[in-house]
Every structure is written in C-alpha cells, then in structure tokens.
Image (cartoon, rainbow, N blue to C red):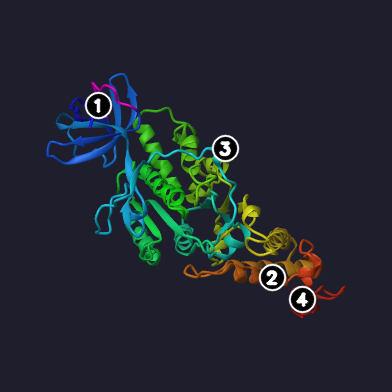
C-alpha cells in the first residue's frame, strides 16, 4: 500500500444523485477505484469519473442514499477497479458488480484484471470463422452467428426478446470444443431475473455459465458496470482459458439509459434524445472487446439485446449499435401477432459474417444456397401479399398463390419452434427444403440443379389451375 492509499479525504462538497464531489484531492486520476466509509462504519465503493484541479467526481456504485456528506471518508486506491478472473466464475450467480447472490462464497480467481478492459488491437485480430449454433432454426439458418462476431437482437416492448436471449444462452454450442456462456442482465424485474435463473439452471449446474443479474431496483451505476464485468470475465476464460465464450447482454437500452442518467447528474451537455454525446464511443468500447486474437486460443462472441423505444429503429441506441456491429436480428410485432416464436423478421435481419462461418466444411454444403433462396422467396411472397391486399387473392396467378402458401409454411413450419426446443441445424435445413418445395421448380433459380434433383423439386404444369399446381408440387 502506498502512502497515498492511506490518505482519507473528508471534504465531500456535495452529493448529486449517484455522484459524490470530493475536494482537496491530490494525485487522483480518472477511473480510479475509491472506498467510501460512512460514520456507521459501513463501506461503499466508487469510481472516479472526472478530476478538475483539486476536485474529484466519484460515482458511487451502491448509490448515495442515506449518506451524509459531513460524515464521509474517501480513500483512493491508485488504480482502476479490478475483479478476480478465472474459472471460479463458472456456475456462479452474481449481481451486476460481481458479488455472489447464490449463497456461495466470494468469487476467487487465479489473478485479477481491470473491468475497463481494452478493445482488441485491429492488427492482432483474427478474422471470425466457424459457427456458434444457437439451436434456434431461423437464426442458425438465415443469420448464422460466427465465433468472434457481435450480432445484436433488435426488439420492442412486449416481444419475447428475453425468452430468446435465455434460449440462446441455454442452447448455444460449438462443435467439440470448450464452450461457456456469460449472461449479463441489466435493469431486469425480479420476475424476469427469476425466469432467467430457471431457464439457465441446467447450464449453470454443468459449470458452463456465468450469470450476472442487475435488477431494476439496483443502483443505476451498477448497470453501467455489469457489461464490463461480464466482458472482463469472458476475456480471461477465452484468451487465457482457451474457451469459446458467448456473452449475452440484455437489455442494452437499459444500460444506455443508466449512462444518460449519470451524464445528466454530471451536468453534461446532452446530445440526441438527451443521451450523452459519447454514447457511440462508449458502446464501441464494449462491443469491440469481442473477437479472436492471433496466437491466442478461444474467442469472445457478443449477442447484445436491445429494445427499440416505440419500435423506432432510428432511435440512438439501435442506430449507433448498428454502426458498430456486424448485422442484426430483428424481431417483428406482425410475426409475433401470428403466434410465431421467435418472431424474427427475416428480411430485416442480417449476419454480415455468415459467409465466414457457414457453408462447405463449416455447416453444410447447401446452407448458403438454401438461405439465399429462402430470403428471395420471402421477399417475393411479401410483394405478392401486398398485391393480394389490393386486388384480392382470386385475381392472383397460380404461381402467386403458391407464394402465399409458401409464406404461411415459412412462418409456421420453418421459423416457429418452442422456446425450450433445441433444433439441430440439420433439421432446420431439411425444414427449409420442405418449405421451398411448396414452390414450383422454376421459382428456385438460386439453387443448383443437382440439389433440386436430389430433393425431388418439380415444376407446375403450364396452364394448370391452382389445384393442379398444388398436386404437381406435392407429387
């Protein structure tokens, strides 16, 4: 312990929301860890947000409720907040600061690491490759998640994004290699937190899960810390422990709102919708910590989940997230209203790295062709649906009516599955073929002829009516 570590400052000028302003400080730096001792002897902890001459602004992790400025003693550690890292986190349930809530002892590690972390050096990045299979057919087939990728889920209030996040965390696998999941929940209700614990109980018992749960009544500062703790734990498991780690973070909108609240308390000039002007760089400092590093084992893959207020995809949080990440999975109210789970909007969803992790030698040789043909057919079906709304189904051609049948089959026979069902990729691709074969062969131009022959694709006879056409496709 240095001489400065032993100095306790008692001149706390004011408490402002979750912030404490300490004056008369010397040699204190940004992002330092602080210990705050109350008159009662209780201790709280904080991080230095800003230093200006002899003033330090400290964000209090446990909030400032019940604190009296005249009875506080503040000591600065001389280094950023650090947490233990290592496999001791696996199987544990903690709050957003990493403190156990499962009744077990504190988490011990083989070392410690600063929670602030660092983005991976672009020069040392290894291009993402090989898939992470989620067991969700629509995701694995159409927006394949690749090791080292950051792929967000865009949702809206009332949609089952938490169920989808928990399902992916419970089911995700990589072929034959050590795999772990870090789940970071932010701003959850107690009911949602209990649901997540129950849904992930099996994976936690198997020692494959780290669960960090920040509830809505926890201090707002903890919400800002939660994803950083999750990523710090994941980085060590991956790059030191050689594991492939999936980090699921929900809800990033709750995180951004916590950032906005702290920014307002600091008196910063607001930007779009009162969010701080550094929202983009702050989100990037989280998302860019995922990836693969040349010469090191393991990978960190990030699946952030965020709700779009009023379903607005141009809202600052989804808008800026889209600039940083490599695609998105978009959930749709219209699909949800049809009783389909997960309610994925296939045409709005995209995985920009899918070609790096799917296809011959990685998933299945026909995977990319089938996915491309499915999306093309869904796009045509949507056009036909709009035309039918204008002129009526009776005025459509036989081929167009086939597209309406395809659209229903796509949603109910391909996309739809139970929230507790793990669907192997092989089964998902076979279902995709069954749905595609409801269309005449002439409409499957993106698939090679040998694949069409192997699956028995047949065309609709010229001049046949809809009943004859359906008979031909069924034959």
On screen, 438 above or below 72? below
Q: Secondary structure at mark 1?
A: strand
The answer, for residue 72, to whether it is visible in the render is yes
Q: Would residue 25 be counted in the magenta stretch?
A: yes
Residue 417 vs residue 376: left or right? left
Front in this rendered view, residue 141 or 260: 141
- Identify the residue shown where x is 35% and y is 58%: 193
Q: Residue 123 — which label?
A: 3
Task: Please identify, in this view, whether the residue under mark 3 or under mark 4 is nearer the observer.
Answer: 3
Q: Earlier in the sequence, mark 3 or mark 1?
A: 1
- Identify the residue shown where x is 26% and y is 21%: 26
Q: Earlier in the sequence, mark 3 or mark 2?
A: 3
Q: Secondary structure at mark 3?
A: helix
Image x and y of residue 410, in percent: 64, 67
Q: Which residues are magenta?
A: 21-29
Task: Please identify, in this view, whether the residue under mark 3 or under mark 1 is nearer the observer.
Answer: 3
Say whether marks 1 and 2 touch (CB < 8 Å): no
- Identify the residue shown where x is 18% and y is 36%: 37
Q: Residues within 10 Å of mark 3 (few under 14, many from 20)?
A: few
Image x and y of residue 327, in percent: 59, 49
- Identify the residue shown where x is 74% and y is 74%: 455
Q: Residue 433 — which label?
A: 2
Front in this rendered view, residue 17 or 166: 166
Q: Which residue is mark 4?
A: 456
Furthest residue toward left:
40
Front in this rendered view, residue 375 or 301: 301
Q: Which residue is mark 1?
A: 22
Q: Earlier in the sequence, mark 4 or mark 1?
A: 1
């Amino acid at each position: 312990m240095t001489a400065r570590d032993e100095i306790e400052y008692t001149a706390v000028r004011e408490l402002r929301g979750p912030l404490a302003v300490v004056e008369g400080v010397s040699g204190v730096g940004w992002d330092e860890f602080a210990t705050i001792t109350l008159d009662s002897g209780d201790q709280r902890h904080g991080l230095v947000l800003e230093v200006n001459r002899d003033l330090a602004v400290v964000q209090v992790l446990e909030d400032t409720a019940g604190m009296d400025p005249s009875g506080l003693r503040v000591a600065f550690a001389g280094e950023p907040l650090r947490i233990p890292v290592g496999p001791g986190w696996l199987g544990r349930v903690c709050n957003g600061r990493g403190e156990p809530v499962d009744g077990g002892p504190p988490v011990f590690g083989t070392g410690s690491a600063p929670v602030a972390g660092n983005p991976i050096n672009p020069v040392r990045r290894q291009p993402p490759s090989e898939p992470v299979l989620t067991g969700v057919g629509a995701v694995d087939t159409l927006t394949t998640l690749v090791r080292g990728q950051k792929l967000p889920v865009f949702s809206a209030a009332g949609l089952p994004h938490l169920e989808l996040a928990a399902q992916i965390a419970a089911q995700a696998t990589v072929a034959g290699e050590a795999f772990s999941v870090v789940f970071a929940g932010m701003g959850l209700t107690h009911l949602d937190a209990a649901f997540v614990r129950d849904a992930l109980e099996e994976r936690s018992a198997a020692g494959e899960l780290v669960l960090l749960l920040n509830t809505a009544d926890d201090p707002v500062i903890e919400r800002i810390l939660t994803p950083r703790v999750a990523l710090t734990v994941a980085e060590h498991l991956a790059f030191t422990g050689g594991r492939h780690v999936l980090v699921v973070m929900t809800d990033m909108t709750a995180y951004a709102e916590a950032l906005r609240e702290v920014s307002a308390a600091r008196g910063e000039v607001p930007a779009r919708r009162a969010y701080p002007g550094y929202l983009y760089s702050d989100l990037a400092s989280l998302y860019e910590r995922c990836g693969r590093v040349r010469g090191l084992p393991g990978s960190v893959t990030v699946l952030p989940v965020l709700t779009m207020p009023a379903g607005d995809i141009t809202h600052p949080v989804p808008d800026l997230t889209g600039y940083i990440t490599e695609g998105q999975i978009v959930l749709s109210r219209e699909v949800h209203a049809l009783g389909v789970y997960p309610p994925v909007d296939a045409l709005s969803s995209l995985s920009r790295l899918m070609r790096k992790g799917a296809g011959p030698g990685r998933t299945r040789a026909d995977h990319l062709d089938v996915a491309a043909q499915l999306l093309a057919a869904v796009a045509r079906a949507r056009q036909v649906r709009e035309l039918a709304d204008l002129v009526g189904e009776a005025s459509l051609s036989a081929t167009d009516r086939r597209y309406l049948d395809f659209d229903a089959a796509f949603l109910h026979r391909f996309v739809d599955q139970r929230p507790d069902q793990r669907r192997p990729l092989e089964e998902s691709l076979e279902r995709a073929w069954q749905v595609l074969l409801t269309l005449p062969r002439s409409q499957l131009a993106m698939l090679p002829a040998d694949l069409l022959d192997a699956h028995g694709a047949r065309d609709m006879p010229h001049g046949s009516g809809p009943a004859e056409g359906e008979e031909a496709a069924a034959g």
